Amino acid sequence: MTGQRDYEIFEAGDVTLQSGAVFPAMKLAYKTYGTLSPARDNVILYPTSFSAQHYDTEWLIGPDGVLDPTRYFIIIPNLFGNGLSSSPSNSGEAPFPQITYHDAIAIQHRLLTERFGITKLALVYGWSMGGMQTYHWAALHPDMVVRAAVVCGSARCAPYNYVFLESVKAALTGDPAFRDGRFVEKPVAGYRAMGRVYAGWAMSHGFYRDELWREAGFTSLEDYLVRNWDATFARRDANDLLAQAGIWQRGDISRCASFDGDLGRALAAIKAHMLLMPGATDRYFDARDNEDELGRLINAKSAVLHPIPSQHGHRAGNPVNNPRDQAFLKAEVAELLSK
């Protein structure tokens, strides 16, 4: 970015990662919205999704939006690897260390407690990779998280989800700009190939069958692919994209010393009011994974599974230009916040 930035940086110092590697001078970029109450009890944490920066997700915040900054103090922490927080593109670390969601939540926790003195979260809300971070928050800090909304996310990366990401990575790294394990220049063809692969996975069969892309003003299927997908990922550094894909694939709330790989034990640690909102037609965050998780949330204050009834696949959870799905999310979150 050039010019004056609209976000803050939390300097975490030298951080020992879950892998044992030390990340020097680690930085977490974040932005806040609204006013922190004197009791510090009106906080919503809203972590970012794959390749997203806070600019991409703040559309959901507003007095008439899903998250209301006139009532709540909302914090968007940018996930490592997104180009604002520590990433291959801005850290100078080569090779870039393997970061996990556990590492991300540890630094986010430090931000909340050290900078703001926050000890309770009224809500953690996240979509996709943000939903996976939400699940990690609920399991790792059960006494801090009062409510959690997991939108098109899961407690761990399912094998099918992992394979989807392998296809995305293969499309991107097939570009000749990928040499010796990293990109040495912009992979123009790789970005387009990645977008075309993603287009098939992110949206549903019904979305294409019913030509729902016409509702957004596209004149043909090719017009939709070219204008909506071919350059979608070109706005991000390709090495950053690979770093975030790795975080996604390693995602598992139980993959830490506290739970020793026992997913049931990790889910049972959660005490929050839990709202699981998979996309009914999501292809890689399958609703069946949330169904399985629901039965293991035995100590949650409440736990409900409300799939988003939409043909927009995974994107139903990020309905920027989709008023129907926006209304569904807003109503569900309002109900959750009333508990």
Image (cartoon, rainbow, N blue to C red):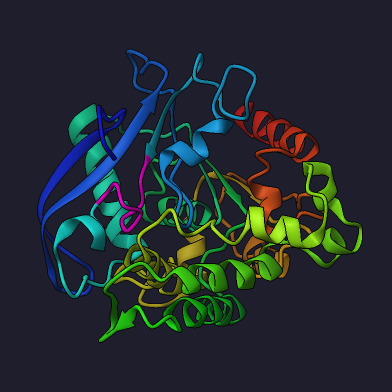
- Dividing the image into 4 quarters, which one contains the N terminus? top left
Q: Is residue 82 magenta?
A: yes
Quick one: 47 or 237, which is closer to the camera?
237
Residue 47 shows in this picture:
yes
Q: Residue at x 58, y 77 (%)?
A: 164
Quick one: 297 or 62, which is closer to the camera?
62
Q: Is residue 316 above or below residue 117?
A: below
- Dividing the image into 4 quarters, which one contains the C terminus? top right
Task: State the extent of the magenta-drawn residues as a range.
Answer: 77-85
- In this view, the residue farthest toward the bottom is 180
Residue 309 shows in this picture:
no
Residue 195: percent from left, percent from top: 58, 66
Q: Residue at x 77, y 34 (%)?
A: 323
Q: Is residue 231 magenta?
A: no
Residue 300: percent from left, percent from top: 56, 50
Residue 307: percent from left, percent from top: 76, 53
Majority secondary structure of the magenta segment? loop
Residue 52: percent from left, percent from top: 45, 49
Residue 5 falls in image quadrant: top left
Please indicate whether residue 326 sits to the left or right of residue 256 in the image.
right
Q: Residue at x 51, y 69 (%)?
A: 156
Please indicate whether residue 81 sits to the left or right of residue 44 in the image.
left
- In this view, the residue farthest toward the right is 210
Please indicate whether residue 50 sits to the left or right of residue 199 in the image.
left
Q: Residue at x 37, y 15 (%)?
A: 37
Quick one: 25 or 117, which is closer to the camera?
25
